[in-house]
């Protein structure tokens, strides 16, 4: 079995951490490892994702899965061993609002990569979390959502695996809300080559100045609130028996300084 440079580095790192003496694999063990590697690489990576009945989610970007075999045993190696990080490692729970110029560039890139016309949608939410830009475009009957790395904004508009986009041409009219209320409009699970994430967007009443999201994973996320809209996203995992669908609740912050928890 031919080893690539990454395999060599991983094996050396593990041997340094493992006090057990080195044991060479037999020819039969090497053959089994090669067969296991072949099966992994041949496995389709774009399987359907089980969806929660009361939270419809659509995944419109392609998932890029990188698989490898670390040594003959196929051990999963934490990214920290090789100096790497977790998915969306630069992500922050508090967003940074984009300037008007940056938001306009992000909107142009969003439309270009999605290959959709400019129907006069306004920039409803435009934020940056770490090295990732999120933008929500809203118009009469249409909405577009894009998540992209900062280095894609204003650059080549060729479709990229590290881009997520959703475009809807049949959106409902904004709801009528009490001043202290919010309404979640859409929530989905999506993916880029960085991994899976959850995003949502909705509407806020006139007295709502902030929204904090409490995810079942333990994260507390500050949503972006702009005008009558709010939105947020955070890193997640592909839904499976080991990783059930995440749930979340909200704390609404009001203009008079009070807060209200919403399940």
Image (cartoon, helix red, strand yellow):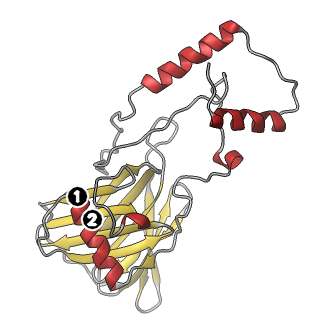
Q: Is residue 172 left or right of residue 226?
A: left
Q: Where 121 falls versus 146 (above or below)?
A: below
Residue at the spot x=32%, y=84% of the render? 100
For image coordinates 32% across by 70% down, the residue present is 154
Left or right of 114? Residue 146 is: right
Q: In which quarter of the view is residue 152 placed?
A: bottom left
Question: Can the viewer see residue 229 in this picture?
Answer: no
Image quadrant containing the N terminus:
top right
Going by the picture, which residue comes out furthest to the top?
28
Asked whether residue 213 appears in the rendered view, the answer is yes
Residue that label 1 marks: 114
Whole-percent x and y of residue 14? Answer: 76, 35
Q: Mark 2 highlights which residue?
A: 110
Residue 3 placement, left or right of 215: right
Whole-angstrom CA distance, mark 2 to mark 1, is 6 Å
Residue at the image point whose x is 78% and y is 16% from the top: 24
**Which percent across, then down, holds residue 132?**
44, 65
Q: Is residue 205 above or below residue 27?
A: below
* Residue 72 position (above or below residue 191): above
Which residue is the extreme one toward the bottom? 256
Q: Residue at x 28, y 55 (%)?
A: 158
> In the picture, which quadrant includes the C terminus?
bottom left
SS state under label 2: helix
Q: Determine which quarter of the picture holds residue 168.
A: bottom left
Q: Which mark is residue 81?
A: none
Q: Residue 15 is drawn in which quadrant?
A: top right
How far across and how far down the image is residue 77, in percent? 66, 38
In this picture, is 193 found above or below 263? above
Residue 126 screen position, x and y as percent: 35, 75
Q: Helix, strand, or loop for circle 1?
A: helix
Are the residues flagged by discs 2 and 1 in contact, CB closer than 8 Å? yes
């Amino acid at each position: 079995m031919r080893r690539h440079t990454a395999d060599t580095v991983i094996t050396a790192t593990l041997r340094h951490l493992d006090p057990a003496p080195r044991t060479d694999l037999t020819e039969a063990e090497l053959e089994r490892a090669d067969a296991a590697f072949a099966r992994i690489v041949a496995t389709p990576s774009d399987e359907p994702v089980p969806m929660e009945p009361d939270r419809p989610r659509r995944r419109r970007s392609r998932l890029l899965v990188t698989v490898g075999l670390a040594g003959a045993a196929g051990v999963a190696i934490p990214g920290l061993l090789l100096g790497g990080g977790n998915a969306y490692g630069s992500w922050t729970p508090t967003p940074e609002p984009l300037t008007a110029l940056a938001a306009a560039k992000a909107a142009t890139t969003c439309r270009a990569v999605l290959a959709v016309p400019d129907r006069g949608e306004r920039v409803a939410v435009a934020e940056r979390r770490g090295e990732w830009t999120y933008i929500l475009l809203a118009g009469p009957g249409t909405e577009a959502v894009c998540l992209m790395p900062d280095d894609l904004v204003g650059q080549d508009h060729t479709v990229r695996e590290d881009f997520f986009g959703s475009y809807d041409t049949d959106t409902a009219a904004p709801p009528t809300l009490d001043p202290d209320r919010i309404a979640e409009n859409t929530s989905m699970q999506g993916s880029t080559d960085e991994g899976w994430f959850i995003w949502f967007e909705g509407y806020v009443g006139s007295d709502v100045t902030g929204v904090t999201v409490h995810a079942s994973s333990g994260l507390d996320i500050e949503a972006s609130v702009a005008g009558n809209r709010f939105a947020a996203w955070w890193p997640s995992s592909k839904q499976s028996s080991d990783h059930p669908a995440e749930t979340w609740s909200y704390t609404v912050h009001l203009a008079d300084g009070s807060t209200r928890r919403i399940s």
